[in-house]
């Protein structure tokens, strides 16, 4: 389209028509083609992530890698033709010095576009190492199909302080009715009145040294700590629970990353309540990216499989 605009402009010039007609033909065609390139860059990424079923996880990764590079390539090609045609038109229209200055400015803009385009691709391009978590997630979902007949699955965790300096006590009931996540319902007392407390799934179920021997946050994909709604964070990051004026927290929420079945089941692992609020990895320190700077472990318990509740309570 850019070449068509340039040829159309050259034809009109040869016929002695006004420069406005030349500019109109050139600018209209270049605007359309540049707009097409921008639409490809903006909307191609969304289409790359579309998919249905469990296979869409890995397909989306591959599509994103392919389409982000493809859009970048086409967009840069459009820019190249745009500046080549602009360069030729400048030499036709203006004196040498004016054309030189205009093309230097255009060249600077081209460098800016290329740099911005590279930054976009760098943000959108998914390296093989980053696809690891998606492959493991797909594996987990596929293996969970063998457990679909077991749904709903129930688990229970008894929270105790296991330390003379803390008083957090309570329970957590966990229910998984589908592969979409686990519902957590519970009550924990002995907390700071009106305070927030970090609440996590920890890696081990070893109470030989109280809450200390339960290890760190459950993190099978080796990500930094973050908020539960983030894409790259610990699987065990459940955020904060809120205590009332009596130091009691009643909660009922669903987490979409933990599971009670499959190779990444949290059965046999542990729930942990912390003294301080979880900063979701935004504290700007190494500890924030590891633990959320949530402080001491004030209550914990091992997650165990439990029988379904009585039919009257279902």
Image (cartoon, rainbow, N blue to C red):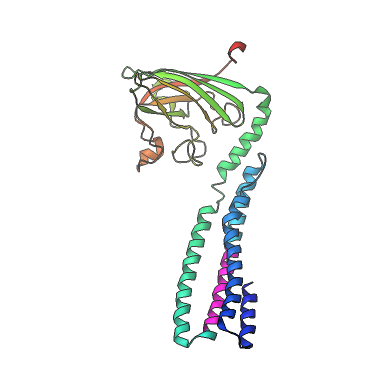
Is residue 281 found left or right of 307 in the rendered image? Answer: left
| Observer-nearest of 102 and 231 | 102
Residue 114 part of the magenta segment: no
* Residue lying at 61% horizontally and 67% vertically, measured from the top left: 32
Q: Is residue 29 above or below residue 288?
A: below
Relative image position of residue 303 (x, y in whole percent): 51, 21
* Residue lying at 66% horizontally and 35% vertically, measured from the top left: 142
Is residue 2 found left or right of 174 in the rendered image? Answer: right
- In this rendering, does residue 73 appear at all? no
The span picked out in magenta is: 72-90
Residue 89 part of the magenta segment: yes
In the rendered image, which quarter contains the N terminus? bottom right
Q: Is residue 86 above or below residue 169?
A: below
Relative image position of residue 132 (x, y in whole percent): 56, 44
Residue 289: quarter of image: top left
* Residue lying at 61% horizontally and 73% vertically, measured from the top left: 2
- In this rendering, does residue 117 appear at all? yes
Relative image position of residue 304 (x, y in whole percent): 53, 19
| Observer-nearest of 280 and 127 | 280
């Amino acid at each position: 389209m850019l070449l068509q605009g340039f040829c159309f402009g050259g034809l009109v010039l040869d016929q002695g028509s006004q420069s406005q007609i030349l500019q109109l033909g050139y600018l209209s065609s270049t605007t359309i083609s540049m707009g097409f390139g921008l639409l490809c860059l903006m909307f191609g990424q969304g289409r790359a992530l579309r998919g249905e079923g469990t296979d869409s996880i890995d397909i989306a990764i591959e599509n994103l890698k392919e389409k982000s590079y493809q859009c970048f390539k086409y967009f840069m090609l459009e820019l190249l033709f745009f500046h080549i045609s602009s360069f030729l038109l400048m030499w036709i229209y203006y004196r040498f010095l004016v054309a030189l200055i205009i093309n230097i400015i255009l060249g600077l803009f081209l460098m800016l576009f290329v740099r911005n385009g590279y930054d976009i691709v760098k943000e959108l391009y998914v390296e093989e190492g980053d696809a690891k978590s998606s492959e493991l997630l797909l594996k987990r979902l596929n293996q969970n199909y063998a457990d679909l007949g077991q749904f709903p699955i129930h688990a229970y965790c008894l929270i105790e302080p296991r330390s003379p300096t803390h008083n957090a006590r309570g329970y957590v009931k966990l229910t998984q009715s589908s592969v979409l996540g686990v519902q957590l319902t519970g009550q924990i007392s002995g907390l700071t009145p009106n305070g927030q407390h970090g609440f996590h799934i920890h890696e081990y179920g070893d109470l030989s040294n109280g809450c200390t021997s339960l290890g760190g946050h459950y993190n099978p994909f080796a990500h930094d700590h973050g908020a539960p709604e983030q894409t790259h964070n610990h699987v065990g990051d459940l955020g904060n629970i809120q205590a009332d004026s009596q130091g009691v927290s009643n909660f009922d929420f669903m987490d979409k990353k933990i599971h009670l079945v499959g190779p990444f089941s949290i059965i046999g692992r542990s729930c942990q309540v912390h003294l301080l609020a979880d900063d979701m990895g935004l504290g700007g320190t190494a500890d924030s990216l590891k633990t959320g700077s949530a402080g001491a472990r004030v209550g914990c318990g091992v997650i165990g499989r439990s029988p379904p509740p009585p039919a009257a309570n279902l």
